[in-house]
Image (cartoon, rainbow, N blue to C red):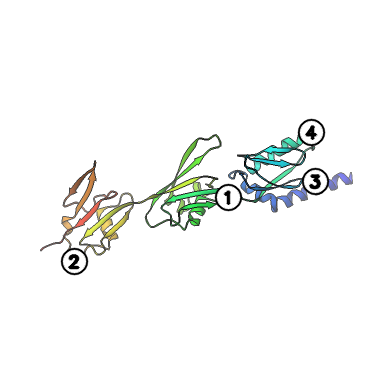
């Protein structure tokens, strides 16, 4: 009786230690992080020290396990691997096996980020990596980054899907994006902002990033405003419509600007 009670106490202590040490790592990655080629896994089975092993996932997504031999785990998450090993070991090998799996070394995962970041390229995903963390690895957004990102993701079945991300919401901490983890071979494209060109009698003629619903007056404000010679009531917009250049004269300053518009502020002669 005492021996049985002591065994139960040891079992509880084991789970506490697993949770606050290596087991926590496995739990953190269970939902969102799939194991891949060259990852090194540490696998243990409670009360069976001979089963503890470190294995590297080979190119076919296979690991070598004591008792079980080769086990196919490609495309599975940490929790799914633990469940699969538990089921296999329970089938004639170990009574009520309690399997713990966590990633000891990440050797397989890369995410590619392109477009309007300062250092586009391929980056190692050393553990669960959010989109915001990957953008940071790439040096952050460029000054002309737009408000959207597209994540191209290939599924295990081989088909691709695109995930659209509102970058403004991401940067403001929107909860829906906080658990958006980048997966192996994801390609992220950061859009380019719409640009308009402000020239003529403004303080700083240049190309400026245009937010949606920006007005002519706001575009001129980005250019530090009118000069003292500006004909404020004779502002023009040169716009491409259906491939043809169109000149809009004497526009209202509340007119919305569009991508690639040229805002011209002429000189007043009076």
Q: Secondary structure at mark 2?
A: loop
Residue toward you, 199 or 268: 199
Residue under numbered circle 1? 128
Give x and y (percent) for residue 137: 50, 56
Q: In terms of sequence position, does the residue under pointer 4 or pointer 2 come before the other?
A: 4
- Label 3 residue SS: helix
Callout 2: 10 Å neighbours few (<14), some, many (20+)? few
Query: In 3D space, how far apart are the residues under numbered discs 3 and 1 (Cα atoms)?
Result: 30 Å
Mark 4 neighbour class, 10 Å CA radius: few under 14, some 14 to 19, many 20 or more: few
Label 1 to label 4: alpha-carbon separation: 35 Å
- Marks counted in the figure total 4
**Which is more N-terminal, label 1 or label 3?**
3
Camera-side mark, 3 or 2: 3
Quick one: quadrant of the N terminus? Answer: top right
Distance between the alpha carbons at the discs numbered 1 and 2: 55 Å
In the image, 70 versus 202, the foreground residue is 70
- Give the number of the mark in front: 3 or 1: 3
Vertical order, 136 against 152 (above or below): below
Left or right of 257: which side holds 96? right
Instruction: Locate residue 236, reporting x and y percent.
Output: 19, 53
| Near-viewer residue (168 or 131) | 131
Specify which label sits upstream in the sequence, 3 or 2: 3
Q: Which mark is residue 40?
A: none
In this rendering, the label closer to the viewer, 4 or 2: 4
Judging by the rendered image, the residue that carries numbered circle 3 is 50
Q: Which residue is mark 2?
A: 228
For the point 25% across and 61% down, which residue is it? 205
Q: Earlier in the sequence, mark 1 or mark 4?
A: 4
Q: Residues within 10 Å of mark 1 (few under 14, many from 20)?
A: some
Residue drawn where x is 48% and y is 56% of the image: 138
- Who comes first in sequence, dot 4 or dot 3? 3
Q: What SS does tag 4 mark?
A: loop
């Amino acid at each position: 009786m005492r021996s049985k009670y002591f065994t139960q106490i040891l079992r509880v202590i084991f789970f506490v230690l697993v949770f606050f040490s290596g087991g926590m790592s496995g739990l953190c990655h269970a939902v969102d992080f799939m194991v891949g080629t060259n990852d090194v896994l540490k696998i243990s089975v409670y009360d069976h020290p001979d089963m503890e092993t470190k294995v590297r996932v080979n190119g076919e997504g296979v690991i070598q396990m004591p008792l079980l031999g080769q086990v196919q785990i490609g495309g599975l998450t940490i929790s799914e691997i633990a469940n699969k090993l538990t089921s296999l070991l329970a089938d004639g090998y170990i009574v009520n096996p309690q399997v713990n799996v966590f990633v000891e070394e990440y050797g397989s995962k890369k995410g590619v980020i392109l477009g309007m970041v300062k250092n586009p390229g391929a980056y190692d995903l050393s553990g669960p990596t959010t989109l915001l963390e990957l953008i940071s690895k790439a040096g952050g957004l460029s000054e002309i980054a737009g408000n959207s990102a597209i994540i191209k993701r290939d599924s295990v079945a081989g088909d691709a899907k695109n995930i659209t991300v509102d970058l403004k919401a991401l940067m403001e901490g929107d909860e829906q994006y906080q658990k958006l983890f980048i997966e192996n071979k994801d390609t992220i494209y950061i859009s380019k902002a719409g640009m308009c060109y402000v020239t003529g009698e403004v303080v700083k003629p240049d190309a400026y990033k245009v937010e949606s619903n920006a007005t002519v007056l706001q575009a001129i404000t980005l250019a530090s405003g009118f000069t003292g010679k500006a004909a404020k009531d004779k502002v023009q917009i040169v716009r491409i419509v259906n491939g043809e250049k169109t000149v809009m004269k004497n526009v209202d300053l509340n007119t919305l600007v569009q991508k690639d518009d040229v805002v011209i502020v002429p000189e007043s002669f009076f």
